[in-house]
Structures are given as C-alpha cells and as structure tokens.
Amino acid sequence: MYPNKLYINGEWTTTEEKIDVINPATKEVIGQIPKAGAKEAALAADAAAAAFKTWSKRTAQERSAILMRWHQLIENHKDGLAEIMTTEQGKPFAEAKGEVQYGNDYIAWFAEEGKRVYGETIPAHHTHKRITVKKQPVGVVAAITPWNFPAAMITRKVAPALAAGCTIVLKPSEETPFTAFRLVELAEEAAELTVGNGLEEGTQVGPLINDKAVEKVKAQIADAKSKGAKVVVGGQAITTKNGFFMEPTIITNVTDDMNCMFEETFGPLAPVATFKTVEEAVERANNSPYGLAAYVFTENIKEATFVSEELEYGIVGVNDASPSAAQAPFGGFKESGLGREGSHYGIEDYLEVKYISMGL
C-alpha cells in the first residue's frame, strides 16, 4: 500500500538513510522512505534532461494519450489513493477522495490543453520573408510540493509540464510522500505501451480493398511499361496469401501521359518522374483536374516555401507524409470537392451568416 522507493531514470531505487512517516492521527510510524540528497537530486536532474530529448519530440496527441491513461488509472485507484492520503496526512477520507478527483481533473484538462498550444503567423514586412512564432517546452522542471494537498499540488504542476513537453523532477513533502509515490507508480504504468499483434505482427502494408483494386494497379503498371516505364521493385500481385495483396512497387522513367500519373491508384504503387526545375515540378503537379493533397520533400527552405505556396492543392505536406489532423482543415481545390472538414472551418458549411442592423 505504501510505495517507498525513489523513481529515477525509469527505475525504483533507495538509499541507506531512511525517514519515518507518521500517521498524525495515531502517532504510528506507517513506513519509511529513502532520504535523498544531492547525489540523488543530480541523478534525477540528469535523467530528466536526457528524457527531455525524446519526450519533447513526442506530438501533443501522444503526450495527451499518455496523460489520459494516467488520468484513468488514478480514477480506477482513487479510493486507495485517498486512503493513503488520509493515513499519512489525517485529512478525512471523503475530503481526501475529493482531492484526488480534484487533482485528477488537472491531468485531464492539461492533456487536452497541451494540444492547443498554438503558435502564430505574423505578416512580414517583405514579400521574401515569413515570420512565425512557435512555443516550445522550457526543459527540465523542478517541483517542490507541500504536505497540505499532497495530490493536487502535484498534478497541478506535473500535468501541464508533461503536456507542454517538459520533463520533471518532483520532490514531495517528506511528511506526505506516499501519495506522491503512488501517483508516480500509476504514471509509470501509463510514460508503458501495450503492443498488439494486429492480426499479423509487424504488418506495414495491408491488402487492397478488393480484386478490382488489384487489377487496377496491375493495369496501371502494364500501361506504364508499355509507354517506357521500368519496374525496379515489385510489380506483381501476391498469390501466396488468401487476400487482395500487391507487392509494393516502384516504377521509373515515368511520363505524364501514363495512367498512374492522373488516375487514383489506391494501392502500393510509387511512380517516379524526374524534373529539372522546381517551377517545372509545380507546373506539372498543377496540371490536374484534382487538388486534394500534395507533398514536397526538400532540405531547401526557400524551395519548400515556394512550392507549398504555388501548389494548387488544399493540403500540402512539406517533409510530412501524413499532414491530416483533426485541428487542421481537410479539403481540396478544383474537382476535389468544396468546403472543409476538421478544424474550426469544418463547422462553417453548416452555418448561415446573419447580419442584423438595429436602430432603437
């Protein structure tokens, strides 16, 4: 019931010296905790600094999902947490349980709020410049919490720090440490990811939707080959599996008159065409009646900006093969549809704008 070890760098550890923890209602020693000092503090800070490099690179959605798992685990164990709090601090059980719920609300709140840390685009003073503002996590955070609210004082600090992408070193009161230790145990159970087999473990490319889809890809490959394309990888349907499978296929020497360049494929086929200038690439990409999504990969920021602004597509992924997100507008130009789904634009198609002028 009373976890009594330090959690540093993903491991539970202890020290030779111990501190007694006393139940203020009975004066009973209910347990002991490690007496950490400068050595342990330095180890914790170093571990947090190392972890910051990876935790800060996780997406806001990934951090949110982990925080929400922590929130759910606390909800599942709130009675046990409240009992620990009452035993080590003396707060009536009902109040302790209320504090656990109150503190857990902060985790849920900041799990969502972390996804809304928006930057800003500012109109530039020259046409060849772009001004953007981005908010980034400050780094390693230290939190020192008192005994009077041993759960809420922690979650109010830890939840926003983790949601923002920071790592954190927590030093709870030595008079009420077990609540903190238990919260950290539940957090550790949450920083763990369950991996399923997904029907076939390690699958990265799934089947096509039906036999017609397989035949369409085969037909596009045959058309491209007849016009001079070369299959360098794959190119065949997979008949050893009981399903609609195609080999992942790459074809080169591709020209714009090949069907694979203007028909939707919906299969693992990547036609490769070359270009001499970015202007040519943009012109050819725009030579289509469709305009849903386009992608550009480059290490040149000037090229990335030019191409992304010139492409006649509703979605442009710059060095990003998966740009769609719930908070971003989804929709295309030209014959790829009207309106937008997702983001705050997604509700506007369902609203009328009413103008009211009133003189009284």
Image (tube, rainbow, N blue to C red):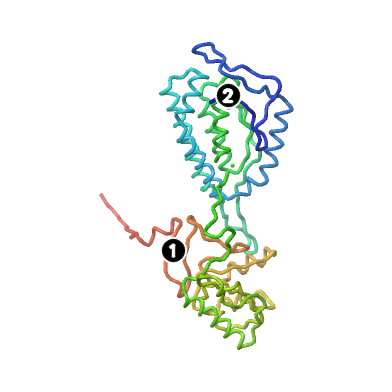
Q: Position of residue 13 (x, y in %)?
A: 67, 30
- Please indicate whether residue 220 sits to the left or right of residue 16 in the image: left
Evaluate if marks 1 and 2 touch, with contact meaning CB atoms under 8 Å apart.
no
Q: Amino acid at mark 2?
A: Pro
Residue that appears at 60% across and 62% down? 320
Q: Which residue is mark 1?
A: 340
| 23 shown above or below 236 | above
- Please indicate whether residue 335 sits to the left or right of residue 137 in the image: left
Residue that appears at 40% across and 23% down? 94
- Please indicate whether residue 250 sits to the left or right of residue 98 in the image: right
Residue that appears at 45% across and 75% down? 335
- Count of residue discs: 2
Q: Amino acid at mark 1?
A: Arg
Of marks 1 and 2, which one's residue comes earlier in the chain? 2
Dot 2 falls on a residue whose secondary structure is helix
| 203 shown above or below 80 | below
| 275 shown above or below 32 | below
Measured in 3D between alpha carbons, the distance from the residue under mark 1 to the one under mark 2, in whole angstroms, is: 51 Å
- The front one of 65 and 341 is 65
Figure quadrant of residue 172:
top right
Q: Position of residue 82 (x, y in %)?
A: 47, 26
Residue that appears at 39% across and 59% down? 348
Q: Nearer the viewer, mark 1 or mark 2?
A: 2
Q: Position of residue 147 (x, y in %)?
A: 55, 21
Q: Position of residue 45 (x, y in %)?
A: 69, 34
Kindly give the residue lying farthest to the top in the view shown.
27
Q: Which residue is mark 2?
A: 177
- The front one of 226 and 195 is 195
